[in-house]
Amino acid sequence: MKGWMGKVLVVDLTTREVATRPLDPNMARQFIGGRGLGARLLWDLVGPEIEPLSPENALIFCVGPLTATGFQTSNRFSVSTKSPLTGTVLDANSGGWWGMHFKRTGHDVLIVKGKASSPVYLEINESTVEIKDAAHLWGKTVSETSAALGQDKNKRSVLCIGPAGENGVLFAAIMNDVSRSAARGGPGAVMCSKNLKAVVVQGRVKTEVDDRERFKFVEYEATKMLKANPITSQAFPEFGTAVIMNIVNAIGALPTRNFQQSYFENAEAISGETLTETLLEKNQACWACPIACTRITKTGKGEGEGPEYETSWAFGAACGVDDLEAITNANYLCNDLGMDTITAGSTIACAMELTERGLLNSDLRFGRADLLERMVEDIGYRRGLGDKLADGSARLAARYGAPELSMSVKKMEMPAYDPRGMQGQGLLYATSNRGGCHMRGNMLGMEVLGLPKLIDRMQVHGKAGFVILHQNGSAVIDSLVVCKFANIAVADEYFARALTALTGVEYPTGELIQAGERIYNLERLYNLREGFTRVDDMLPPRLLNEPATGASAGQVSQLEPMLAEYYRARGWDENGVPKPKKLEELGLAELVEVAR
């Protein structure tokens, strides 16, 4: 196999057995790698009878054929598992250097099963796999663990959990290269349930390329596109992802005070422009990335990466906070404890509203920047009220008799785009297979930025087709595995050409996008098998009934007509179940019985 390494590494921590098996070429052809391959392996390994935090759940690390080739942004990897936060199929994606170093050990996949009798870590290189004692690492933060295990991005890369993972926070992240994270949905809690503290990788095995000259030419063309695009060449490098804060706020789509409003009067204070002017030290890039959107910042308390747009929003507008230094410090702490900043900030915002409504007895109030760090730390260590917030906003709000105050879909908190001001985004959230998520085909490009073209953000009819196209394309990008930002400038056909040149397998653009559709349908089937139904494709009542503010004043999400159109366009029945004809068309005929 070219492009793929052709090897799957399986580690059973219960028996301490380590085995290597060949990667099924047909499976690789159909599901590519990363998210797609992870979902297909999870289908076979983890059924509905298995609880997310039981030893029987699998933790699947997958790279893709483009990983470690030097192609633009080819540094990423995916972690697939059953989510402890949502109970859905889950993949969480991360950049940095770990994915590149792991593939250079000569593997496409690492499957971790079982549970060690005491804390351990894995050390993997091209010739050996060792299970080592991690008792001395348990309790250490992410930065402490990474330093103790010799993190050196150019030589060896450390992936680990922090105290949030060790304490079973349901939105605990898996961190790599100190500040990169596979965060959403709680994979860090699954890693903890296996008594696995870290995975250290280093290797020198190169990826074999079928047509190197052709591959290099496509890579050259992609580089030109990234340099020519104003977002990837100027906006992100200069201002980071938070450059869109003022843009989203201006259209009345910035969720504020737990989505009570969609306009934040102090958005400028937490924007990318303000971050650049006040706290930025320099920008930084992941391996093989010319975009360099990462912010290295410094406050009176410390220095580190971030915050990104979603984090600035989650601890900022969502909580009614305009203190950028407090937001940045909360971000540093989340990284070191190892937890998802979106769910952390959104759950704190939910607690603030519960308190203001008299349902929760706490000091939390909108605007209380002084409480952010303490609350983040209490969540990470499950102390006091933090113990309740550590299970996410859906469980918190239900506990206090107001489930409607959780701004989540399938128990995953929605990010920083209000569906009342972006109708397609609401449909995207409702139908996302891992819960409320913008990384399943973000509609920001088409509904706000005009990429690749601008459509009416308030349009309802006809919107489903655009959402489906973005969802299928997103599944491809997550499976190659490359960065979503590269896809802003580089069209799908160039990824198809690169994959063909790399592997020697012909991937016409249409066939590559069909692979994305195959992956999305498989994930849907997984959730149906877990007991999810049409009822779960729903937004919080607030977004359907309470009008937006700002430039979207008076608008609510028109979900129902879009959802019916979406099911038809997907080839699913009125209950959101893929029809046998659609599954046969996608080469998933063996799974037809599940859909009946």
Image (cartoon, rainbow, N blue to C red):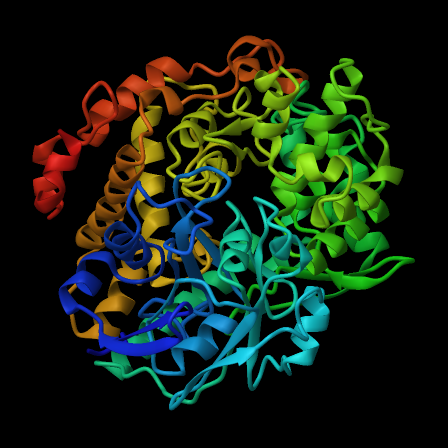
Instruction: Count the marks.
Output: 0
Choose between 126 and 463: the one closer to the eye: 126
Quadrant of the image occupied by residue 63: bottom left
Left or right: residue 576 compared with residue 203: left
Residue displayed at 45% across by 51% down: 488
- Can the viewer see residue 206? yes
Q: Name the image quarter holding the N terminus.
A: bottom left
Q: Is residue 77 above or below residue 592?
A: below
Choose between 4 and 377: the one closer to the eye: 377
Residue displayed at 65% across by 53% down: 164
Measuring from the top left, give residue 252's x and y in whole percent: 63, 23
Choose between 224 and 90: the one closer to the eye: 90
Q: Name the image quarter holding the C terminus.
A: top left
Please identify the residue farthest to the right as the structure is shown: 300
Quadrant of the image occupied by residue 553: top right
Measuring from the top left, give residue 189's x and y in whole percent: 54, 52
Left or right: residue 175 compared with residue 226: right
Measuring from the top left, give residue 184's x and y in whole percent: 53, 47
Residue displayed at 22% across by 71% down: 23
Measuring from the top left, give residue 306's x and y in whole percent: 70, 56
Left or right: residue 23 compared with residue 140: left
Please identify the residue farthest to the front as the structure is shown: 117
Residue displayed at 27% across by 57% down: 41
Choose between 322 and 519: the one closer to the eye: 519
Q: Is residue 481 above or below residue 135?
A: above
Q: Is residue 517 above or below residue 164?
A: above
- Can the viewer see residue 491? no
Left or right: residue 153 compared with residue 533: right
